[in-house]
Image (cartoon, rainbow, N blue to C red):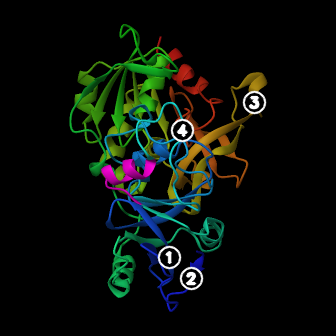
Amino acid sequence: MALSAYSHAQPSGATGCIVFADGTVVWGKGFGASGNAVGEVCFNTAMTGYQEVMTDPSYAAQVVTFTFPHIGNVGANDEDVESRGLGAVGCIVRQEVTRHSNFRAMNEFADWMRDHGKIGISGVDTRALTRRVRTNGAPNAVITHSPSGKFDLKSLKRQAAEWAGLEGMDLVPGVTRAEHQDWRSSNWQLGFGYGEGAHSKPHVVAIDYGAKDNIFRNLVQAGAKVTVVPARTSFEEIMALKPDGVFLSNGPGDPAATGVYAVPSIKRLIEAGTPLFGICLGHQMLGIAAGAKTAKMFQGHRGANHPVQRVGEGWGESEGLVEITSMNHGFAIDGETLPEGVEQTHVSLFDGTNCGIAIKGKKAFGVQYHPEASPGPQDSFYIFEKFVGMLG
């Protein structure tokens, strides 16, 4: 089944569809949960890690189109979950999800999707859909699965058209933790599972704007004792925990919207000289706190193969080095708005957008990408070591 116009008849056997705000309907076969969900349609180019992608809170209110065709072939398991049932509302795949063929699998991916309330559509021409997003930008749509094959297309179109979209939307309250948590686990190893940190090293307070669990594991792996706190934790509450450094996590939505309550605290942390490290949404809000502006991207960056180059001073022989990184963001710092005293340290080699900043005279820096491997390459783990290493 391929992209079809709104006026085309429903194909025989179609039990799922994506209805766009402009009336376009994409038909397919539903799997996972029944029902419907509204969100922004994006695409992810990673060849591994579909379960981690689906549980990444940064994908809240999004429908992920997987460009890799073999989704579901390694099944699902408890170790590859990156959050507490959060993440994307649904996914779109080319081939029908088949039974798994992997020794780590504990469940079939389609059954896991159903159990976690996520909607899937297979049989879609994902190449055509990806071209649509690249040409026209990330659209709003409703993804729906009805085993009976009955759909109220007019109602679904209206729901898609009336959804406000991600710009101006603060999604962090729905994904942040509700209370403080002492984070203990470190990185996973085959045959051993997740390790555990010593908890006697530099203390990092990690503000959870919707982080993947593996990011906290990487901080522990790099040698930090980690305390995770909710997004609205005040400057006074953070400082009462006596941090050696503060980490600003990834998360979903518009950084300017979340920044209404987050940026004032970040500004005070900068003024206090507290070492800061931000990634993705945290990086963007660090930029806003330093005087830069952010903007909605046309299609965003999502995948595990994004080349980023180090361009800032202070890298020594490694300046100019290219890292292959994992990304998931639809907003970015506008590099043209960086004020004096804020240095650009990394840029995307795909489109030249900002991928890293450092505040001169402060131990404060951020990167746009996810410098860990769930999913993705491991080129950027050094950034966790750089941050923990500066804490003494």
Q: Nearer the N terminus, badge 2 or badge 4?
A: 2
Q: Could you say whether the residue bearing mark 4 is in a helix, strand or loop?
A: loop
Where residue 11 appears, x then y in whole percent? 51, 82
Q: CA distance from mark 2 to mark 3?
A: 48 Å
Q: CA distance from mark 4 to mark 3?
A: 20 Å
Q: Amino acid at mark 2?
A: Ser
| Of the pair 319 and 236, the residue shown nearer to us | 319
Instruction: Tell whether position 117 is magenta.
Output: yes
Vertical relation: 277 (above or below) 6: above
Vertical relation: 247 (above or below) 97: above
| Of the pair 252 and 238, the residue shown nearer to us | 252
Q: Could you say whether the residue bearing mark 3 is in a helix, strand or loop?
A: loop
Q: Are marks 2 and 1 in contact (CB under 8 Å)?
A: yes
Q: Nearer the N terminus, badge 1 or badge 3?
A: 1
> Which of label 4 and label 1 is nearer to you?
1
Residue that numbered label 1 is attached to: 27
Is the stretch drawn in magenta largely helix, strand or loop?
helix
> Which of label 4 and label 3 is nearer to you?
4
Residue 319 tag number:
3
**Residue at the extreme bottom:** 7
Residue 4 tag number:
2
Residue that numbered label 4 is attached to: 370
Q: Residue at x 48, y 48 (%)?
A: 291
Vertical relation: 203 (above or below) 106: above
Instruction: Tell whether position 24 is magenta.
Output: no
Q: Which residues are magenta?
A: 109-119
Where residue 168 appears, x then y in whole percent? 38, 64
**Label 1: how many Cα within 10 Å (few below 14, some 14–19, many 20+):** many
Q: Amino acid at mark 4?
A: His
Q: Nearer the N terminus, badge 2 or badge 3?
A: 2
Q: Does residue 15 show up? A: yes
Q: Residue at x 76, y 32 (%)?
A: 321
